[in-house]
């Protein structure tokens, strides 16, 4: 596993162009949010539902000062604390829903692709129908139903989101399984008498899950947006259960119309930053993992001293020249002509 | 499948695709029914329980057919949907179809306006980013695409409202038209802007267009992000094609290669995916309408959700499902007409 991780990082390192920087920028921002989420009780100055400290009530819609870094909102909460606690809520919900969706979608896809026949057809049809449905509406319906049973906490929110993402894992895993099923290594396994379960677990699974991390990262970004949308519509997590950015935004709508836009600005900024970061990581991963999109970095090669001095002095790159190590490395059309 | 290309295979493709709509619709309707009718128990007491005496509650239940066995309710539900009967709301006792008729025009206006903005912005920007891949312009356009996609649509809306309210106080920031316009324009099509044109009431048209600007930009930016990403990737793929190389070898100028050769072919997959964005657009419309107090189907849905009106929610969600299925059918047919490879 460690070797595989190293290979993976190596691939990212050797990728050329924007994809690499985007990946690292996204990873860095995500890391900041993860730190906020884990250490929220120590970083945040106040609790997420705290409206007074040391016997002094917080002001309503107070401006920023030494006690409240970003001011307070219309429910007397400290905005800075809500933002930090919100990272914890968002990441908890997203991780829970993405893992649950993966746990259901991946085995289903594997089974459907491997078994084939009518099981496959029915499952594909069901998943396609679910996938075609507007995801926010699906989440709305689920949270509407779960509200009575589970209340409006983190678990209910995560479960409402889970159903949206199952079909995506299913589709990706099922399609890769179908194409891998007839591969020589599977035939070989069958020939030595491996049972279907063994083939699925030992041979197909590890070949098929490779596309899951990209999908999971992009889904995490999407789930965060949907969670905020639920909160904005008043169907998400209630403020007494946990701090949620979308809910805070909905509370700030009226203030914005009155001209006070800061209480709305901060939660939105948090959502944008985290979604952008996750998308950057996902896209970066996609461009590095997907060979069709990948462009490798040119490896610098230093020629020996026998190179004549006038050639070595032609450009700023001096004695370093590119080595082509893939068809994609042809200095391609667009830029060249754009530069001239 | 036979490999013979021609009108026969196209007709057959369309026929098969239309027949496939039936099971797809059936599955969606079943999911909607199971979720909303089976899970929660009793819709009547959830929405008006505690406010009415038990006898009237039982009467309401019977009127909705909730005292019948489940399979009978299911068959009845399907039978109603086939006849475009989406039920009657519990909270204000209106046929869901008339709610859709009254509010659908506003939602249609919003989504069409948003799509126009998205196409005008997204197609050229995506082409630019694809052509000059990895350049500064590409980086800026891609980050714009990601951020507009990442920014919660309601946040963009709220900030736009705050900005406009501060700098242009007379510009309308909520609703679809001023009270005068809605009062003066007679109803024909239930689409206010069309009615206004029919009535030759041009100050009303102007008023509605002014109201449209902010919501359409808000929803349009969301779709723009998607279109930019799509067009960019497809232009990059198309530029790798042999025919592009061939065009370049013939000495066709690069701008023309991109415009006439690569971009045209890059658009084929884009049509499909733009069609699939209808689901995203509907989700976005619900949020945009809530933000701008836009009198559309989305606002109605949110109101009924807060009223805990199960039949209204079920009817509206069913309607959305029908729309999605029909649009995906139309997109597939359009795609088969444009791209012969689809209908093998």
Image (spheres, coloured by chain):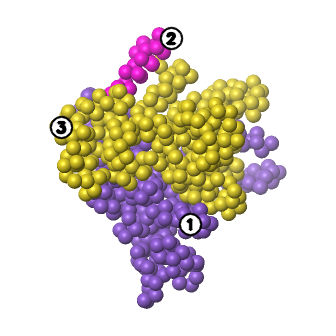
Chain colours: A purple, B yellow
> Mark 3 packing: few (<14 Cα in 10 Å), some, or many (20+)?
few
Residue B27 is left or right of residue B221, and the answer is left
Q: Earlier in the sequence, mark 2 or mark 3?
A: 2
Q: What x and y, as percent, mark residue A264?
A: 55, 65
Secondary element at tag 3: loop
* Looking at the image, residue A147 lies above or below residue A242: above
Where does label 1 land, which residue?
Answer: A255
- In this picture, residue A284 sits left or right of residue A300: left
- Residue B205 lies within the magenta run: no
| Residue A220 visible to an observer of this rendering | no
* Magenta range: B1-23
For disc 2, the chain is: B
Residue B181 occupies which quadrant of the picture? top right
x and y percentages locating residue A181 in the rendered image: 32, 33
Q: Is residue B46 visible?
A: yes
The residues bearing labels 2 and 1 have C-alpha atoms spaced at a distance of: 60 Å
């Amino acid at each position: 596993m460690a070797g595989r991780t190293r290979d993976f990082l190596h691939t990212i390192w050797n990728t050329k162009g924007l994809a690499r920087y985007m990946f690292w920028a996204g990873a860095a921002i995500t890391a900041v949010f993860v730190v906020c989420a884990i250490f929220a009780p120590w970083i945040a100055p106040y609790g997420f539902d705290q409206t007074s400290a040391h016997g002094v009530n917080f002001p309503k819609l107070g401006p920023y000062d030494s006690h409240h870094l970003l001011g307070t909102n219309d429910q007397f909460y400290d905005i800075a604390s809500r933002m930090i606690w919100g990272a914890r809520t968002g990441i908890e919900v997203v991780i829970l829903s993405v893992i649950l969706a993966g746990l259901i979608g991946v085995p289903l896809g594997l089974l459907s692709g491997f078994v084939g026949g009518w099981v496959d057809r029915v499952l594909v049809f069901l998943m396609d129908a679910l996938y075609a449905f507007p995801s926010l509406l699906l989440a709305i319906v689920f949270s509407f139903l779960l509200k009575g049973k589970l209340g409006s906490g983190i678990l209910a929110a995560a479960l409402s989101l889970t159903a949206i993402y199952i079909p995506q894992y299913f589709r990706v895993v099922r399609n890769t399984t179908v194409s891998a099923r007839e591969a020589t290594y599977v035939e070989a396994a069958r020939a030595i008498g491996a049972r279907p379960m063994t083939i699925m677990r030992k041979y197909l699974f590890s070949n098929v899950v490779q596309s899951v991390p990209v999908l999971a990262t992009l889904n995490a970004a999407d789930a965060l947006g949907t969670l905020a949308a639920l909160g904005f519509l008043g169907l998400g997590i209630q403020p007494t259960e946990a701090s949620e950015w979308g809910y805070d935004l909905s509370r700030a709508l009226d203030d914005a119309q009155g001209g006070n836009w800061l209480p709305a600005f901060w939660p939105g900024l948090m959502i944008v930053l985290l979604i952008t970061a996750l998308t950057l990581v996902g896209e970066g991963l996609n461009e590095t993992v997907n060979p069709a999109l990948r462009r490798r970095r040119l490896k610098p090669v230093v020629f020996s001293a026998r190179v004549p001095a006038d050639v070595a002095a032609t450009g700023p790159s001096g004695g370093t020249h590119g080595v082509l190590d893939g068809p994609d490395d042809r200095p391609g059309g667009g830029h060249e002509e754009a530069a001239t | 499948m036979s490999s013979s290309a021609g009108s026969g295979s196209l007709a057959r493709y369309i026929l098969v695709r239309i027949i496939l709509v039936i099971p797809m619709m059936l599955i969606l309707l079943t999911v909607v029914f199971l979720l909303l009718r089976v899970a929660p128990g009793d819709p009547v007491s959830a929405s008006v329980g505690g406010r009415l005496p038990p006898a009237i509650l039982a009467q309401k239940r019977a009127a909705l057919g909730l005292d019948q066995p489940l399979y009978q309710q299911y068959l009845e539900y399907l039978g109603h949907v086939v006849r475009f009967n989406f039920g009657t709301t519990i909270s204000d006792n209106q046929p869901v179809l008339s709610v859709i008729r009254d509010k659908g025009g506003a939602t249609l206006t919003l989504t069409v306006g948003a799509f126009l903005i998205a196409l005008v912005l997204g197609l050229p920007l995506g082409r630019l980013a694809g052509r000059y891949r990895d350049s500064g312009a590409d980086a800026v356009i891609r980050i714009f695409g990601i951020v507009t996609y990442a920014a919660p649509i309601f946040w963009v809306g709220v900030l736009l409202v705050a900005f406009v309210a501060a700098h242009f106080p007379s510009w309308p920031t909520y609703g679809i038209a001023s009270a005068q316009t809605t009062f003066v324009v007679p109803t024909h099509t239930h689409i206010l802007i069309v009615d206004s044109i029919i009535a030759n009431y041009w100050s009303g048209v102007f008023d509605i267009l002014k109201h449209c600007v902010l919501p359409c930009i808000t929803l349009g930016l969301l779709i723009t992000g998607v279109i930019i990403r799509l067009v960019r990737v497809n232009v990059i793929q198309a530029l790798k094609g042999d025919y592009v190389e061939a065009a370049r070898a013939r000495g066709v100028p690069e701008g023309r290669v991109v415009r006439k050769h690569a971009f045209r072919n890059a658009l084929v997959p884009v049509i499909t995916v733009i069609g699939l964005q209808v689901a995203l657009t509907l989700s976005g419309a619900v949020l945009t309408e809530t933000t701008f107090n836009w009198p559309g189907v989305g606002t109605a849905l949110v109101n009924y959700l807060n009223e805990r009106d199960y039949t209204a929610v079920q009817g509206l969600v069913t309607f959305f499902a029908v729309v999605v299925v029909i649009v995906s059918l139309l997109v597939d047919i359009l795609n088969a007409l444009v791209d012969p490879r689809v209908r093998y």
